[in-house]
Image (cartoon, rainbow, N blue to C red):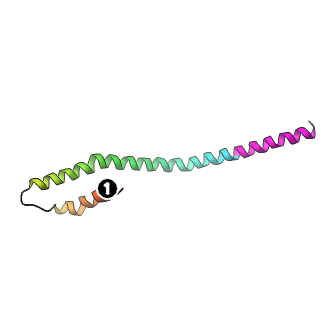
């Protein structure tokens, strides 16, 4: 192997080292970011399921019950203290 062959081979290995370094850093970044994104996705999914299947029907039920009771214009204490803050806190998003 002559010296000109060695010079031609070194840029390829340098480029290969750079590419391996970039690939390694990208994989490390994915290993850090993917669990965080998956956790956020699970929390978002759980929130939407609870919002759709629990909180909205509960609010409709409470409003229906308060309208059925004649002469009672106010919401029950338990709803004002617990239900309304829960619904208000979840609907802000």
Q: Is residue 62 above or below residue 8?
A: below
Left or right? Give the position of 58 relative to 27: left
Residue at 18 percent of width and 50 percent of height: 61
The residue that appears at 62% across and 46% down in the rendered structure is 26
Residue sitting nearer the eye, 12 or 24 = 12
**SS under mark 1:** helix
Image coordinates for residue 17, horizontal then vertical, percent: 74, 45
In the displayed orientation, state which residue is furthest to the right. Answer: 2
Q: Is residue 28 above or below residue 85?
A: above
Going 91% across and 40% down the picture, which residue do you hit?
4
Q: Position of residue 39 (x, y in %)?
A: 45, 49
The answer to which image quadrant residue 85 occupies is bottom left
Left or right: 52 as drawn, with respect to 11: left
Whether residue 8 appears in magenta in the rendering, the answer is yes
List x then y, in percent, for residue 32. Answer: 56, 50
Q: Which residue is mark 1?
A: 91
Magenta stretch: helix, strand or loop mostly: helix
In the image, taking residue 8 as reference, residue 64 lies left or right, namely: left
Which residues are the magenta region?
1-20
Q: Quadrant of residue 53?
A: top left
* Residue nearer the viewer, 50 or 8: 8
Quadrant location of the C terminus? bottom left
* Residue at the (89%, 38%) spot, across then down: 5
Q: Residue furthest left?
A: 70
Q: Is residue 42 left or right of residue 90?
A: right
* Place of residue 55 in the rendered image (x, y in percent of width and height, measured from the top left): 27, 51
């Amino acid at each position: 192997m002559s010296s000109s062959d060695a010079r031609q081979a070194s840029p390829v290995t340098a480029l290969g080292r750079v590419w391996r370094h970039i690939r390694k850093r990208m994989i490390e970044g994915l290993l850090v970011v993917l669990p965080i994104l998956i956790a956020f996705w699970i929390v978002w999914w759980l929130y939407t399921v609870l919002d759709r299947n629990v909180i909205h029907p509960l609010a409709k039920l409470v409003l229906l019950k308060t309208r059925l009771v004649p002469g009672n214009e106010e919401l029950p204490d338990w709803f004002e203290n617990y239900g309304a803050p829960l619904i208000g806190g979840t609907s802000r998003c």
